[in-house]
Amino acid sequence: MGSAMPKNCSGVSRRDALQLGLGALLGGGLVTALRARGFAAEVANPPAAKAKSCVLIWQDGGPTHYEMFDPKPDAPAEYRGDFKAIPTATPGVQFSEHMTKLAKGFGKFAMIRSIRHEQGNHGAGNHYMMTGAPPRIPVGCGAFVSFHPSMGSVVACEKGAPAGLPAYFSMPSMARSGGPNFLGAKFAPFVVAEDPNGRSFKVRDVALPEGLTGERFDDRAGTRSEVDTLKRFMDRAAGDPALALDEHYKQAYDLMNSREAQAAFDIGREPERTRERYGRNAFGQRCLLARRLVEAGVPFVTVYDGGWDHHSKLFDSLKKRLPEWDNSVSALIEDLDQRGLLDSTLVIALGEFGRTPQINKDAGRDHWANAMSVLFAGGGTPGGTVVGATDKKGFAAIERVLAPENFVSTVYTKLGIDPNKILFNQQGRPAHLVSDPTPIKELM
């Protein structure tokens, strides 16, 4: 009797079935039994939540690890590139020369240098890093695919929304695989497309249209409900689009009547010195707006930062871009820390993969999924920590090799969400939240 209890293909052992009771399997069905099993495990072993919110800085296109957080100063020039390495606050750890402020502030965040995967195109890489689930079928490089809920949607579903605000924001657009999949439209991100650095910054659906009073707005909402005679199919398996439309209407209505939303988006309340510290550019002001949103209780904010696909003129481009990026991200981490919010807020920065070791004929680097760097701060993350390493030329992760699943499981665990949780789609089919629920122990 000392051997392991055999399990069926759904991961339920014979002992589990007996403990759940034959009545549950025969009367309520296997799906009901699995739900009961998952719920029991969740209650028995709830993860200890350290963080309440997460700011994901998504560097779409695949940022170079060489020119940011994993320089190779001793490699030949065709691998090393044009930028020098500089010391950080942790002895023996170097960043690239344009990461000056983050290098000085390295005591407040950790760096993962050893995540790798095998999805070397944008569509597949986006999906894997944004969800922790590799795409089920081959997808094109430019594809926008969704086979599994994104981190933002899962957090919105599990943590809930604060008063008067959605639970999940994305600025200025949604990432390729940043949607809710089978969780439903309720957990899709609220997209803030407007530039908060603009003089007339105003978020759609937060303020009433000009000339429309609150009383007239209520009258119109009432009229809409009276003329709307569409039948609703409440069963999730039906996938009724009218329910999603109802959610969007409700969200828009709540936002227009929300003092909390109007206050959170009023970035003009910030002192000018704070706005200057973040950088007077669209990216910097979105980082500041993200801080205001987590301060208001929003559990997940994505700052979508496109344009990191440097197949050519990489060094010319990054000479201009990296100092601003370094300034804004360091400002966000420092500001959260000074306000006592860093312990309860994760700040993570990454893209879908890294860049090729050898510089190409166009002075750029191409897609490379064998090595990448991920910035990870907040929620009790030990500062000044480097997890893993790549080889001397940056070809591949060779020490403490990690998968996207480990990264995503770390995010969930720090937010008090069990990465081993079983989700159910509209048809009631079970799916693990993350197939490998092992978080990165060095960051816990």
Image (tube, rainbow, N blue to C red):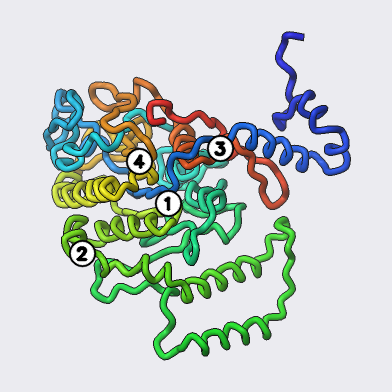
Work out which quarter of the rendered image holds the C terminus and state it: top left
Badge 3 is on which residue?
Answer: 418
Mark 1 highlights which residue?
142
Name the residue at 24% across, 46% down.
334
Name which residue type carries label 4.
Answer: Gly
For mark 4, what is the residue? 378
Q: Nearer the viewer, mark 1 or mark 2?
A: 2
User: In the picture shown, does residue 205 fall above or below 302?
Assistant: below
Q: Amino acid at mark 3?
A: Asp
**Residue 263 picture quarter:** bottom left
Q: CA distance from mark 2 to mark 4?
A: 24 Å
Q: Pointer 2: what residue?
A: 271
| Residue 244 place in picture, x, y as percent | 61, 66
Please name the amino acid that badge 1 sits on.
Answer: Gly
Q: Earlier in the sequence, mark 1 or mark 3?
A: 1
Local SS, label 2: loop
Of 76 and 113, nearer the camera is 113
